[in-house]
Image (spheres, rainbow, N blue to C red):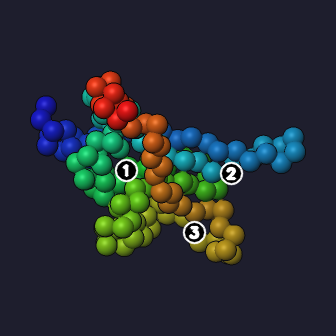
Amino acid sequence: MTEGSLLDHVLAPEGLSPRFQPIFEANGAEWQLHAVECLMRGPSDTNIEPADILFEYARRKRAESAVDRACIAVALKAAQQLDTVPRFFLNVHASTLGRDADFVRFYRRFGSRSFDRSPPPDPGNSREAALLERTEIHEDSRPLASAGNQDRAG
């Protein structure tokens, strides 16, 4: 499979697989569902199935915005199958927010069609909202330098 077709495979309708991670809030001995975070996986049976590799691939191809849009579309569609969720967290690259001038309009337009929730009476205290989080990139997840490069670095 060529790299171009691998990216096409990621962006295809069945290219991404959502996973939902519940986040609980502890109130003494009581636990309540606080939110659900959507975690995305790449195409199954490929080397970019794990999330860290999928998003590193997107960054290297400078395709963060296209991949983020595809992830959000898949996540919001899959979220329709969930029971009532107080909050729904979605991840997005900072570069998407900074370089994709139409992203917020896309999110509002797509989100309003796909994650149809009636507005809460108090928007400042929304318990039924889809929230965007900036994707975290951990330095320790970057490839290590080869032993030869470490020797030269001193």
Q: Earlier in the sequence, mark 1 or mark 2?
A: 2
Element on which disc 1 rests: helix
Number of labels in the image equals: 3
The amino acid beneath tag 1 is Cys
Where is residue 138 drawn, in percent x and y? 47, 43
Residue nearer the viewer, 145 or 82: 145
Q: Residues within 10 Å of mark 3 (few under 14, many from 20)?
A: few
> In the shown orientation, is residue 7 left or right of residue 22?
left
At horizontal 41% and vertical 60% (from top left) the residue drawn is 94
Residue 117 shows up from this direction = yes
Q: Which mark is residue 118?
A: 3
Query: Based on the displayed image, in which of its 4 quarters is residue 24 positioned?
Result: top right
Query: Based on the displayed image, in which of its 4 quarters is residue 102 positioned?
Result: bottom left
Determine which residue is flagged by label 2. Answer: 34
In the rendered structure, are the residues bearing label 1 and label 2 in contact, judged by CB atoms less than 8 Å apart?
no
Element on which disc 2 rests: strand
Element on which disc 3 rests: loop
At horizontal 44% and vertical 68% (from top left) the residue drawn is 112
| Structural distance between the alpha carbons of marks 2 and 3 | 19 Å
> In the shown orientation, is residue 37 left or right of residue 142?
right
Residue 143 shows up from this direction = no
Q: Which mark is residue 71?
A: 1
* Residue at the extreme front of the image, as rendered: 154
